[in-house]
Image: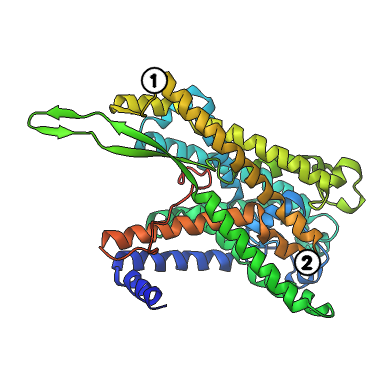
Amino acid sequence: MKKLTQTFKNIWAIDELKSKILVTLALVLVYRFGTHIVLPGINPLVLDNLKSSNKTNGLLGLFDTFAGGAFSQASILALGIMPYISASIFMQLMTILVPQMQKVQKEGESGRKKINQWTRYLTVIVTAFQASAYIAYLKSPGYAEAIIPAFKDYFVYSTVTILTAGTLFVMWLGEKIQDKGLGNGTSIIIMVGILARLPQSIVQEFATKQEKAGGGLLIFLIEIFILIAIIMALIILVQGVRKIPVNYAKQIIGNRQFGGARQFLPVKVNSAGVMPIIFAQAIMFLPTLVSFTNLDSAKGIVKMFSDHQNYGYMIAYSIMVIGFTFLYTALIFNPKQIAEDLKRNNGFIPGVKPGQPTADYIGSIMDKITLPGAIFLAAVGILPGFAQRLGVTQGFSTFFGGTSLLIMVGVVLDTLQQIETYLLMRQYDGLMSNGRVQGRQGLPTTSAI
């Protein structure tokens, strides 16, 4: 406890770090305040009465989670940062698949600025389309009663404009956190939106268990213990790396000797991050698009894909997560490029010839560690469904795995890594007595790549 107190004192003693923390907290509070402002033309009193009977499912539930409940509250920030995430994912894939985009990306700072600007333009287009779909959702039974009749003639135009402006404002907040605050702004905004629902979910789960006769409190404590164990296992997955030994040949330039050191090439067990789960959820949601406003009457495959507790859903979802993990890892991890960089810098792996043999060796290691990582990632993705089957409420079950837990763990580790870097630079002790906190591969935004 004494070391923890001293660590907080050390953090607060660094003026630059303290300023970044305060700026981040201020911008996060602004974002949370905006999520409670209801769209013009909607009666907040009627909306509060309707929210209890409306439940978001599938990808809509994912949007609402990322937006911190703003989606279901018909807020001016209802779409949150998701349109920017979608545009960033598309631009990242284009820089991998399109040679012209690769050239722009390799132009350095100027190329990065061009891609960022194109991403912003694409965000406006994506937001406008999503805003139109959201208006259709608000006009569906359950929300239509909250729209003020006198405002219906202007509702479509004003809502599209305000939602687009709201998403651009959230994007601006994320960039300001990135520049003036601490951590990756986009990831922190998403994490704050997810964490905003945690206290309410815990209270609801506790109240539900208290209603059960005998052992309700014990079951609740067991659930908390299991949640902590899952978080610890997920930290191991996020930080897990395989270190490949690399030697560098000695070079004598003038009277000085360079190289000759032995280092390690860290290869992450989960290089794809959270992307396979996001892609799998998007694909699984497609069959429900035809009836997302009335899922209770859906049948067959539509009903199965909208029910996270269904075993068929879990099997299909797991297969997709494993497949997307290998696909996305292959897109972002290039063993041939790594082998060329090692050769260019006079580095080599002991017992492996430079060039193509090195690329094959690194690729084979990547395949071996990706499989268990993909299986574990798929298991994490279906844990919320199992939690619901075991009696956990729907809101609290989302924190037992899936995208929400992965993002929270990854962002917290990334932020702690930055804080530890500041401490070590000022010759203070780090956050851990043994080793260092390792970050993770962020969400695929242009500011996090």
Q: How far apart are the alpha carbons under marks 1 and 2? A: 60 Å
Amino acid carrying label 2: it is Lys
Tell me the residue that label 1 is attached to.
355
Mark 1 closeness class: few <14, some 14–19, many ≥20 residues within 10 Å:
some
In the rendered image, residue 36, in percent from the top left (x then y), is placed at 63, 68
**Observer able to see residue 170:** no
Q: Is residue 84 above or below residue 253?
A: below
- Residue drawn at x 64%, y 64% as measured from the top left: 227
Earlier along the polypeptide chain: callout 1 or callout 2?
A: 2
Badge 1 element = loop
Looking at the image, the residue that sits furthest to the front is 351
Task: Give the number of the disc on residue 296.
Answer: none
In the rendered image, residue 228, in percent from the top left (x then y), is placed at 61, 65
**Observer able to see residue 112:** yes
Mark 2 closeness class: few <14, some 14–19, many ≥20 residues within 10 Å:
some
In the displayed structure image, the side of residue 245 where residue 428 appears, left or right? left
Nearest to viewer (mark 1 / mark 2): 1
Q: Mark 2 and mark 1 in contact (Cβ < 8 Å)?
A: no
In the rendered image, residue 1, in percent from the top left (x then y), is placed at 42, 77
Task: Give the number of the disc on residue 51.
Answer: 2
Q: Quadrant of residue 409?
A: bottom right
Q: Nearer the viewer, residue 397 or 196?
A: 397
